[in-house]
Amino acid sequence: MKPLTRFTKSRNFDLYMNAAIKLGIPFKYYKTNASIGYFFKNQKRLFMLNNIPGINNYVSSYLALNKYKTKQVFSKANIPHPKAKLFKSNILYKNIFNKIKDLKRPTVVKPLKGFGGDGVYVNLLKDNEIRKSISLARNYYPIVLVEEFIEGEDYRIVVLNNQVIDIVKRIPANVTSDGVNTIENLIRKKNKFRKKYYLQPIKIDFLLKKFIKKQGLTLTSIPPKNITILLRENCNMSSGGDTVRIPLIKVHKDNILMFLKSAEVLGLDFAGIDFITPDISKSYKHIHSGINEMNKSPMPGANYYADLKMNNFVCEEVLKYYFKL
């Protein structure tokens, strides 16, 4: 396993730079308080800001960034997605619960705009859980969504130029017990490994402690050997999650066509689709599943680190597409 070469403040920008070097594409990096620069070849330039390559147009990017607008477009296009309600910052809590009474519980609370799972709280059943989560989510963006929770596994689908080029399953932060170490020590050991490959650490915080408590565990617990302990409910790599690559042949063709349609109706040439389903080998038409979010600039780290293979082909494909290589 070979870690990426570091150039910038952004791991995802670095992945694009590594791909550019392999493809012989020059790049210019501006040393600012953000990772900004561009790649250039054949009289074309592709600008980058952190993990965002300038491939999609402004309107499509706006639609994908605004989660509620995305849902409105999907409703008209018959694309499966969780039912949701939108709440602005000035609405009273008592009015929120009146408005969400037709939503099935458990629910999810999330900011209207955001990245990397920040401010997202899932699997909420009780009023007080929803109320507290709304307050916390508003720290990230004043307008929030409350939506129905879809039970299933979390997948990231990457679409480029009307083709599905990669699918990975996202697994929440976890550790595997050795029968000797406490959960806290297992987390520290795994974080040392993650740091070696520039992966964000598993944070030991209130949410982690609360989640393992539901499983009858604490940080000082020593589970039996070879038990996998999930540490969070969300699946983001930014909170310590892992990814596993899924061969396209194992994905139902109805789902593939639906993924392509979802990018098309938003006008996205490059998209990351977050899809929740209990079984990706079965058609979305026959099981309860849906697109959780659309991303106008999917972070390539989830694909690069899948199965810890350090495969950078997604960034390579993006650059080859843009520069027509």
Image (spheres, rainbow, N blue to C red):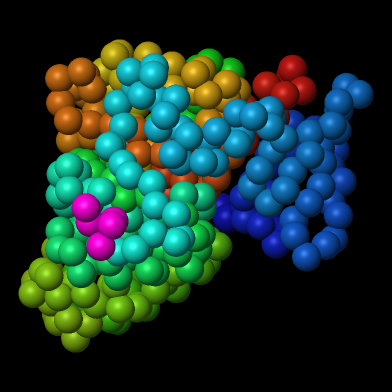
The quadrant holding residue 209 is bottom left
Q: Where is 140 relative to 309, above or below?
A: below
Question: What's the residue at 28%, 57% (across, down)?
Answer: 95
Is any part of residue 306 visible from this angle? Answer: yes
Q: Nearer the viewer, residue 112 or 29?
A: 112
Q: Which residues are magenta?
A: 94-98
- In the drawing, does residue 244 fall left or right of residue 166? left
- In the drawing, does residue 38 fall left or right of residue 68? right
Q: Nearer the viewer, residue 302 or 263?
A: 263
Among all residues in the image, which is located at the extreme right?
Answer: 43
Spot occupied by residue 214 in the image (x, y as percentages of width and height): 12, 70
Spot occupied by residue 14 in the image (x, y as percentages of width and height): 68, 51
The quadrant holding residue 275 is top left
Q: Where is 198 relative to 207, above or below?
A: above
- Tell me the quadrant of the picture where the C terminus can be found: top right
Q: Where is 72 relative to 28, above or below?
A: above
